[in-house]
Image (cartoon, helix red, strand yellow):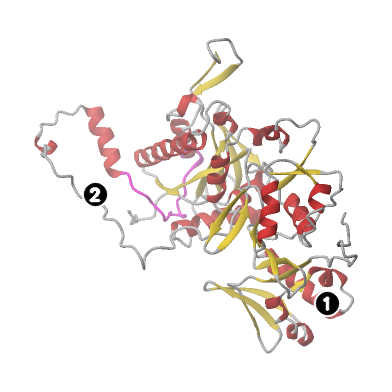
């Protein structure tokens, strides 16, 4: 895989891949050998280790070569390997690629998903590599980073020569040509990037269209900016701060709740007479009473009959039809459409509902799919720990200790929209989510139930629960519903 000699005849020292604790992580050892990781005000217990093992923990600040962890010749090596794996499970490690474990850093690998572990698939000199169309380089502070929404890790490029080599891969390059550049970390880096789907192998002879050769049909339908927005504006596939962390509170004053009025002639609409019908007054009353409810009365939970009424009025398919798609004035394939209670761009209706049920009279605790065509619930077998994690993450997002009685996860079949629309596909999906969310709110209010929209969701957890790739069908919103606790918390 590598020419091991320079022109001088001296062998090239292979690059070393090492693991070390992330910069924001502090490892603390108690007198009894208990080790814990502390970060951002949180702590994670990592287990009890021998005195010999805890003495070596300081090496995790500089970095431990992975080849040493793999050897496990001594009991201490086995303990350290177990500690490192536990750190990786919680996403508290980073990996460095360089000429030695303590030499010049060429690449720093930052995991973006828990339990990432670097792998180097075997590359042959005959392989041809290209950059993924979802990959991008950018400046982050004073660093140059390479990432992709498909990748489980981010690569901090510290070597200008490596950055230039990566730039060559905007067009497919044979590996044997890249080997001639003779950077000690080059081939190892390429293998790591192939593992993370930032680079991919192409057939230099037969792959004329790189878009179709990278991944499956579901990926063909994604534009770069849409997949990036989906992966980076949700939880589960990145390690960036998320939620209400007030990142600019110390540098910029908050904007006022109501925009300052424009200068100009004011027309006071409040002085105009109002002549409402009963229907308008009823709708206006519901709109005025709409609010978010974050606590629920588990003594009298929502019933299955109420849930059926709620779903029937907000999401059930009302009708279906087929229409031909006309391109450039000519005939084309037919597309099926449906009508539902809320609006959807182009009548696409890509949204699907998955229900995490904690308490519902007449319905067992579990995970369900709502079949909007049949108006039926279909049970999906998931691990109890995954269901609990989804419910608890919703409670955390609402700022409550108790989980919602029912959590509705709004998922999108992305290809339903991107097959037709370019550049605006993901934007249209989010507009649909807004329309459906307001429909949920109004129906919950009319039925005397409590509801609350939730802004964050773990797309990786949902993918594990359903077995569907995050870019095929993934969550784009959540809504908690149940019997409100008296007195209600209104915001």
Q: Is residue 362 above or below residue 281?
A: below
Q: Give the quadrant of residue 286.
A: top left
Q: Earlier in the sequence, mark 2 or mark 1?
A: 1
**Does the rendering let one see residue 270?**
yes
**Image point 20% across, 26% down: which residue?**
277
Farthest front residue in view: 8
Q: Is residue 385 above or below residue 308?
A: below
In the image: residue 265, left or right of residue 461: left
Q: Can residue 361 be seen?
A: no
Point out which mark residue 259 bears.
2
- Report if residue 157 lies within the magenta region: no
Dominant SS type (magenta): loop
Q: Secondary structure at mark 1?
A: helix
Number of marks? 2
Residue at the farthest top position: 330
Q: Which image quadrant: the C terminus?
A: bottom left
Q: Residue 224: horizontal and vertical position, in percent?
A: 58, 40
Q: Magenta segment, which residues?
A: 290-306
Q: Is residue 225 left or right of residue 158?
A: left
Q: Quadrant of the N terminus?
A: bottom right
Q: Which residue is mark 1?
A: 77
Give the CA distance from mark 2 to mark 1: 62 Å
Q: Nearer the viewer, residue 218 or 363?
A: 218
């Amino acid at each position: 895989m590598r020419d091991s000699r320079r022109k001088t005849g001296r062998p090239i020292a292979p690059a070393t891949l090492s693991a070390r604790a992330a910069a924001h992580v502090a490892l603390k050892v108690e007198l009894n050998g208990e080790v814990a990781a502390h970060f951002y005000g949180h702590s994670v217990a990592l287990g009890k280790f021998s005195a010999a093992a805890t003495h070596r923990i300081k090496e995790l600040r500089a970095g431990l070569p992975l080849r040493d962890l793999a050897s496990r010749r001594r009991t201490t090596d086995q303990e350290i390997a177990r500690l490192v794996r536990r750190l990786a499970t919680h996403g508290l490690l980073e990996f460095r690629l360089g000429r030695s474990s303590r030499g010049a850093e060429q690449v720093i690998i930052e995991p973006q998903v828990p339990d990432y572990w670097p792998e180097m698939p075997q590359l042959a000199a005959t392989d041809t590599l290209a950059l993924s169309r979802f990959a991008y380089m950018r400046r982050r502070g004073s660093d140059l980073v390479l990432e992709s929404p498909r990748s489980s890790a981010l690569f901090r490029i510290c070597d200008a020569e490596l950055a230039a080599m990566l730039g060559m891969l905007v067009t497919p390059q044979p590996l044997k040509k890249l080997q001639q550049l003779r950077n000690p970390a080059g081939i190892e880096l390429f293998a790591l990037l192939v593992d993370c789907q930032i680079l991919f192998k192409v057939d230099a002879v037969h792959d004329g269209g790189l878009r179709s050769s990278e991944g499956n049909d579901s990926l063909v339908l994604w534009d770069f900016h849409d997949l990036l927005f989906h992966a980076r504006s949700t939880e589960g596939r990145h390690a960036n701060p998320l939620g209400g962390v007030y990142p600019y509170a110390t540098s910029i004053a908050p904007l006022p709740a109501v925009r300052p009025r424009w200068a100009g002639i004011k027309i006071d609409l409040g002085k105009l007479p109002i002549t409402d019908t009963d229907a308008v007054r009823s709708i206006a009353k519901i709109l005025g009473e709409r609010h978010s409810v974050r606590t629920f009365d588990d003594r009298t939970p929502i019933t299955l009959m109420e849930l059926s009424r709620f779903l029937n009025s907000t999401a059930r398919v009302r009708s279906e039809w087929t229409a031909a798609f006309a391109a450039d004035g000519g005939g084309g394939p037919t597309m099926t459409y449906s009508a539902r209670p809320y609006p959807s761009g182009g009548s696409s209706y890509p949204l699907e509902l998955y229900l995490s049920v904690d308490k519902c009279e007449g319905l067992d605790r579990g995970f369900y799919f709502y079949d909007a065509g049949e108006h039926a619930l279909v049970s999906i077998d998931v691990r109890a720990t995954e269901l609990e994690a989804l419910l608890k993450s919703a409670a955390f997002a609402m700022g409550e200790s108790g989980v919602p009685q029912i959590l509705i996860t709004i998922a999108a079949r992305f290809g339903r929209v991107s097959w037709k629309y370019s550049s605006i596909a993901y934007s249209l999906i989010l507009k649909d989510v807004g329309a459906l969310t307001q429909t949920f709110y109004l129906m919950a209010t009319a039925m005397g139930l409590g509801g609350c929209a939730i802004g964050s969701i773990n797309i990786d957890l949902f993918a594990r629960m359903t077995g569907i790739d995050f870019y095929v069908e993934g969550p784009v919103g959540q809504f908690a519903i149940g019997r409100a606790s008296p007195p209600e918390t209104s915001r």
